[in-house]
Image (spheres, helix red, strand yellow):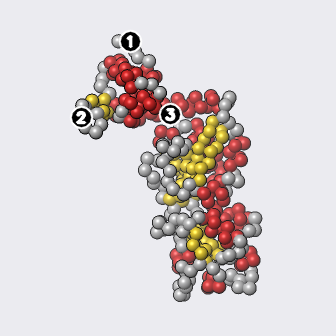
């Protein structure tokens, strides 16, 4: 039996295996369904096995055979390696657009003022940074890699631990040392409290109530009063402007503390099991831009 054009046939098989549809695979590969069918039949004849069970009824007329299902992950991994190698070659002559999704506050307060170092190391990668507060679909929105804050477990995504925050009060220097100076937790009664509600769905996310209890302050205290904001960067900026005391997070306030826009009136910190993770689809694990961004990001985290 004469071998089919194996690369095209394998591409056709992988696309049909994902979509379980000849027309959908044909649209993705920009060929006709008849061409897809011919490639699949040729590959099955060459290998002398069936790749799909075909049914004339039911919601899906195609289903993978056991042999096809077992071989599919290796095939997809091989295509990813091939794509990565081609992109490495292309990078020497052309630019590659690489899309990263990042929480808005993390982008503003941590990532953006560091990202020039990545661009200096990888001048042929053009980063497209998308900030979003919701969990984007990596496949439909064509995302290469993301940074997420949470427990580290997200369906269909690989994750690599990056950073874990500590939480503590922060405010402007003028507020800390003004007429109602902040010397002990009880002094917080004299100032507006700024609440970051962006992660209110997570019970383990620190709040003013949890920080005060963790700090050993048991006296009666109206901890829910003040300004509530659903954006962490806005909460920090409000504290910088002198309009209250915020519960700061290490990654989001480190630069403002270092440059004197904020001060930390109390030493006590509260930890949190939530953390920042780099996330990506399994099939993109060996993708050249993902590897480059991951390597750089881990170096940046390690240098803190």
Q: Residue at x 50, y 33 (%)?
A: 80
The residue wearing badge 1 is 2
Of callouts 1 and 3, which one flags the residue occurring earlier in the amino acid sequence? Answer: 1
The residue wearing badge 2 is 57
Image depth: mark 2 or mark 3 in front: 2
Q: Secondary structure at mark 3?
A: helix
Vertical side of 130 occupied by 221: above or below: below
The residue wearing badge 3 is 80
Of callouts 2 and 1, which one flags the residue occurring earlier in the amino acid sequence? Answer: 1
* Left or right position of 58 against 160: left
Image depth: mark 2 or mark 1 in front: 2
The spot of residue 56 in percent (x, y) is 24, 31
Whether residue 214 is visible, yes or no, is: no
Work out how far the residue at label 1 is from the one at label 3, CA to CA, in angstroms.
Answer: 27 Å
Q: Do the residues bearing badges 2 and 3 touch, measured as CB atoms within 8 Å? A: no
Quadrant holding the N terminus: top left
**Mark 2 packing: few (<14 Cα in 10 Å), some, or many (20+)?**
few
* Left or right position of 192 against 207: right
* Residue 290 in which image quadrant: top right
């Amino acid at each position: 039996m004469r071998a089919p054009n194996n690369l095209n046939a394998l591409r056709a098989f992988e696309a049909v295996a994902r979509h379980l549809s000849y027309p959908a695979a044909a649209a993705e590969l920009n060929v006709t369904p008849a061409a897809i069918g011919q490639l699949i039949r040729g590959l099955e004849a060459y290998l002398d096995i069936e790749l799909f069970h075909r049914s004339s009824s039911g919601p899906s007329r195609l289903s993978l055979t056991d042999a096809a299902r077992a071989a599919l992950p290796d095939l997809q991994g091989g295509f990813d390696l091939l794509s990565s190698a081609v992109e490495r070659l292309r990078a020497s002559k052309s630019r590659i657009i690489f899309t990263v999704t990042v929480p808005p506050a993390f982008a503003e307060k941590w990532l953006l003022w560091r990202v020039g170092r990545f661009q200096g190391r990888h001048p042929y990668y053009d980063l497209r940074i998308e900030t979003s507060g919701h969990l984007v679909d990596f496949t439909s929105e064509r995302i290469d890699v993301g940074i997420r804050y949470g427990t580290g477990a997200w369906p269909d995504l690989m994750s690599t631990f990056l950073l874990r925050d500590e939480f503590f009060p922060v405010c402007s220097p003028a507020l800390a040392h003004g007429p109602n100076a902040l010397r002990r937790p009880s002094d917080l009664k004299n100032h507006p409290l700024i609440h970051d509600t962006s992660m209110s769905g997570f019970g383990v996310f620190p709040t003013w109530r949890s920080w005060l209890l963790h700090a050993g302050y048991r006296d009666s205290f109206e901890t829910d009063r003040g300004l509530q904001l659903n954006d962490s960067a806005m909460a920090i900026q409000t504290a910088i402007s002198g309009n209250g005391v915020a519960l700061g997070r290490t990654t989001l306030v480190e630069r403002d503390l270092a440059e004197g826009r904020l001060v930390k009136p109390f030493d006590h910190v509260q930890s949190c099991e939530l953390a920042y993770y780099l996330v990506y689809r399994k099939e993109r694990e060996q993708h050249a831009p993902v590897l480059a961004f991951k390597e750089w990001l881990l170096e940046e985290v390690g240098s803190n």
